[in-house]
Amino acid sequence: MSDIDKFIEQGKALGLTGEQLQAYVAKHEQESVEREECAQRRDEERRLPKIKLEMEKEKLAADIRREEAERAAKLEIEKQERAANIKREADERDAILKKEANVRLEHEHEIEKL
């Protein structure tokens, strides 16, 4: 049984007929619609903080992921820079050792010539 049928029966039980019954049904139908709309608004108002909280959690998680990615990228850059510095220092040491070896060889050749 629909609400309208229920309102008609209630109105008839009160002895209403014709326009009075129509007004009674219309009034109660409007009140029913208003109650439903009010209930929907309350439900939305209850859900809204949850939705906002969920959105804030998602934003925070995204911020954390972005910061972690930035830290990882920074660490990788630092690692590559350290590796490049170690290689450059090793190359410089090798160059110095080669020069020293060449100088020794030249001295040995000079000594052999004497």
Image: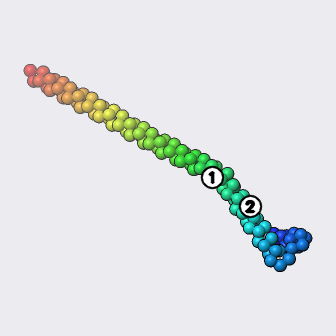
- In the displayed structure, would residue 48 be above or below residue 109? below
Residue 33 got which mark? none
Q: Looking at the image, which is closer to me, 99 or 43?
A: 43
Q: What amino acid is at disc 1?
A: Leu
Residue 35 got which mark? 2
Which label sits in the foreground, 1 or 2? Answer: 2
Relative image position of residue 49 (x, y in whole percent): 63, 49
Classify residue 36 as left or right of residue 65: right
- Element on which disc 1 rests: helix
Classify residue 16 as left or right of residue 96: right
- In the displayed structure, would residue 35 be above or below residue 74? below
Residue 107: quadrant of the picture: top left
**In which quadrant will I find the N terminus?**
bottom right
Question: Which residue in the structure is indicated by mark 1?
Answer: 48
Q: Residue at x 40, y 37 (%)?
A: 79
Classify residue 24 as left or right of residue 73: right
Residue 88 in view (yes/no): yes
- Element on which disc 2 rests: helix
- In the displayed structure, would residue 66 be above or below residue 96? below
Q: Residue at x 72, y 58 (%)?
A: 39
Residue 84: quadrant of the picture: top left
Nearest to N terminus: mark 1 or mark 2: 2
* Residue at the limit of the structure toward the left, as seen here: 114
Q: CA distance from mark 1 to mark 2?
A: 20 Å
Q: Looking at the image, which is closer to me, 53 or 5?
A: 5
Report crowding for label 1: few under 14, some 14 to 19, many 20 or more residues within 10 A (C-alpha): few
Residue 3: quadrant of the picture: bottom right
Relative image position of residue 77 (x, y in whole percent): 38, 40
